[in-house]
Amino acid sequence: VVKGTDLAVRDFRSSDPYVILTLGNHTRRTRVINSNLNPVWKEDFTIPVNKATDSCLLKVEVWDNDTWRPDDRMGDAEIDLKPLFEIERKQKKLVVSPCNENCLYRDSSIIQRGDGKKVQEVWLKLRNAES
């Protein structure tokens, strides 16, 4: 999780955003960035997945942290990980484009590195968010 841009104001003049990632039974959470509508997290997470049995949808939720009342949901998005699993060993790069069925903001490149690891850079547009 790298950063958020132009997030909605949920408190008096700003928000205290954090991100929750969910894949199957696994959940990860970023730290809270106080009073910031353009937060920079730069946090890496590893989430185990069994592509044969687990869901391939990574759910991304952005929340505003509140001290004295329940946290406010700021928006959500989903990333379909199937293309990440389907890239073939001999294929070095695959591009997934934005469409009505995904939350991509722009083309997303999946690259298979020399060590066999697959990396995907994703820019998401939140759903259910104030603009």
Image: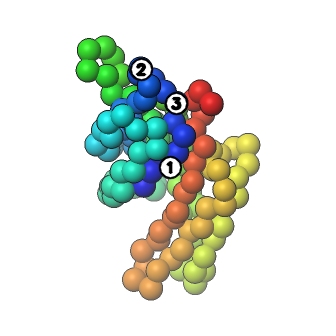
Number of numbered callouts drawn: 3
19 or 4: nearer the eye? 4
Q: Bin the neighbour count of mark 3 within 10 Å (Cα to Cα): few under 14, some 14-19, many 20 and up.
A: some
Residue at horizontal 54%, vertical 40%?
Answer: 6
- Which residue was labeled with disc 3? 8
Label 3 element class:
loop
Q: Of the residues tagged 1 and 3, which is closer to the observer?
A: 3
Amino acid found under the numbered disc labelled 2: Phe
Residue at horizontal 42%, vertical 55%?
Answer: 2
User: Which badge, 1 or 2, comes first in the chain's sequence?
Assistant: 2
* Residue 75's disc number: none
Rendering coords of residue 128 (x, y %): 59, 28
CA distance separating discs 1 and 3: 28 Å
Q: Is residue 117 above or below residue 39?
A: below
Q: Is residue 53 shown to the viewer in this render? A: no
- Which residue was labeled with disc 1? 56
Q: In the visual, does 65 lie left or right of 51? A: left
CA distance separating discs 3 and 2: 11 Å
30 or 28: nearer the eye? 30
- Which residue was labeled with disc 2? 12
Label 1 element class:
loop
Q: Bin the neighbour count of mark 2 within 10 Å (Cα to Cα): few under 14, some 14-19, many 20 and up.
A: few
Residue at horizontal 73%, vertical 43%?
Answer: 100
CA distance separating discs 1 and 2: 37 Å
Label 2 element class:
loop
Rendering coords of residue 25 (x, y %): 34, 40
Q: Bin the neighbour count of mark 1 within 10 Å (Cα to Cα): few under 14, some 14-19, many 20 and up.
A: many
Amino acid found under the numbered disc labelled 1: Cys
Q: Of the residues tagged 3 and 2, which is closer to the observer?
A: 2
